[in-house]
Image: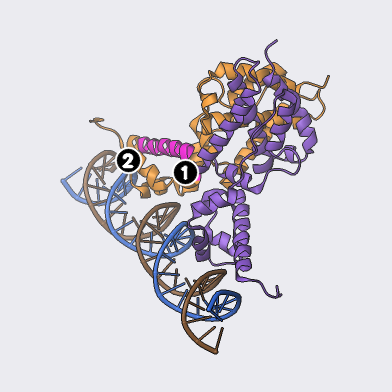
Chain colours: A orange, B purple, C blue, D brown
Amino acid sequence: MSTPHQSRADRRRATEARILDSARELFAEKGFERTTIRAVATAAGVDPALVIQYFGSKRELFDRAVQALPAPLTATDADELVDQLLASLGLKLGGLPEGALAMMRSMLTDQAAADHVRAALGRQIEGVGAALTSAEDAELRAALVVTALLGVTIGHQLLGLAALRAAPAERIAALLHPAIKALTAPPG
Amino acid sequence: MSTPHQSRADRRRATEARILDSARELFAEKGFERTTIRAVATAAGVDPALVIQYFGSKRELFDRAVQALPAPLTATDADELVDQLLASLGLKLGGLPEGALAMMRSMLTDQAAADHVRAALGRQIEGVGAALTSAEDAELRAALVVTALLGVTIGHQLLGLAALRAAPAERIAALLHPAIKALTAPPG
DNA sequence: CGATTCACTCTACAACCGTTGACCGAACGC
DNA sequence: GCGTTCGGTCAACGGTTGTAGAGTGAATCG
């Protein structure tokens, strides 16, 4: 009942963090549009005006809440690549950070989120394509790999398809592995 | 300037169709939430009230505008299956109907659209799984195939990724083909 | 201890939304 | 021809949203 004494700065940091957590959660669950500042404020136990006062606008709150870029790919061979891709799309080890889910949730209906995701996917594709120079159509193949995994992630994390939810992540990864290799392998 | 005389019933049907067309286009472009009845009405050259008068509510308008289910799968062998899947996800022959795009565009932020898509994907998965009884994990494999293709379609049609847009559909289909076979093939 | 800062709340505004009901005029049935 | 139907418009309401500004009370500092 009592957090005995807290410095003013501590309280400030704490409520700011509470607001950001609530925002992340709601943005991930409902997307940018359908998440209202009032709902975020209520979830954080705070007045709506405070959210604006701290973060300036709903858009800036969103930006602050989701600042989580997928780690750039550093793989050099195909097997390592597959593992990194599966991890970066949340198919391994506990799923994606909530900020990334929020971004994905909003990507089809919010212009800014769409731009952000397009750019992130573009970088991923570039990275995968670079590891694939041996094959022709390297960039196209890379794009197919990345978007295919994106689809699996959407079905799993955002749509919650039962057939995917029921399966352990390692099993999914094991099944995807040969498919990705088939996509990236040179013909023949 | 003059469509000389039109029967009242003809005019009615014509404007109703104009409204539905505008609705489909806007829903596909912006999703359910961000599409306003006022915008649909303006695009159709009509008063907003008329849209409600004809269709009852925004939700019913949406339902009427998108009534386009993916054709059920009837494939019995794997090769045929692949072709049907590629076609049903708009990767062949001129893309998806606009109603399907509208549904997909809204699926991450609108509950009703999400339910609809989940059900449609579930049926697809069931169909693919049935054609895969030879393999273990048939349903999981089917789910991965369907969601992977969903991802490619999203990247292509909804996000407009340059790397995919630039490629001819047959090339994409040709590259996906072996990957899908790898996903559906029994181990060994 | 007095003055000031600052975390936080209250109230309110302006814009936009979906939806409604009253109304108008031209096509219809008789 | 005349009364009625009906495609279509107009104006408005009630609700929700993002956001601004004034205010309050407790922690801070000299």
At numbered mark 1, what does the secondary structure look like: helix, strand or loop? Answer: helix
For mark 1, does the 10 Å Cα neighbourhood hold few (<14), some (14 to 19), or many (20 or more) residues? some
Say which residue label 1 marks: A61
Residue kind at label 1, given as amino acid type: Leu
For the N terminus of chain A, which image quadrant?
Answer: top left
Residue C4: x and y in percent read 30, 50
Is disc 2 on the same chain as disc 1?
A: yes
Residue A34: x and y in percent read 46, 46
For the C terminus of chain A, which image quadrant?
Answer: top right
The part of the image, by quadrant, that contains residue B122 is top right
Residue B97: x and y in percent read 67, 46
User: Taking the image as drawn, is residue A72 in sight?
Assistant: no
Main secondary structure along the magenta-highlighted residues: helix
Residue kind at label 2, given as amino acid type: Gly
- The verdict on residue A18 being magenta is yes
The mark that comes first in sequence, 1 or 2, is 2
Q: Is residue B80 above or below residue B166?
A: above
- The verdict on residue B86 being magenta is no
Chain hosting mark 2: A
Q: How many numbered circles are shown?
A: 2
The part of the image, by quadrant, that contains residue D12 is bottom left
Q: Is residue A41 above or below residue A182?
A: below
Magenta stretch, residue numbers: A12-32
In the drawing, what numbered circle is on residue A45? Answer: 2
Front position in the image: B65 or B168: B65
Residue A141: x and y in percent read 75, 29
Rendered residue at 48%/37% (across/down): A28
Left or right: residue A13 versus residue A69 is: left
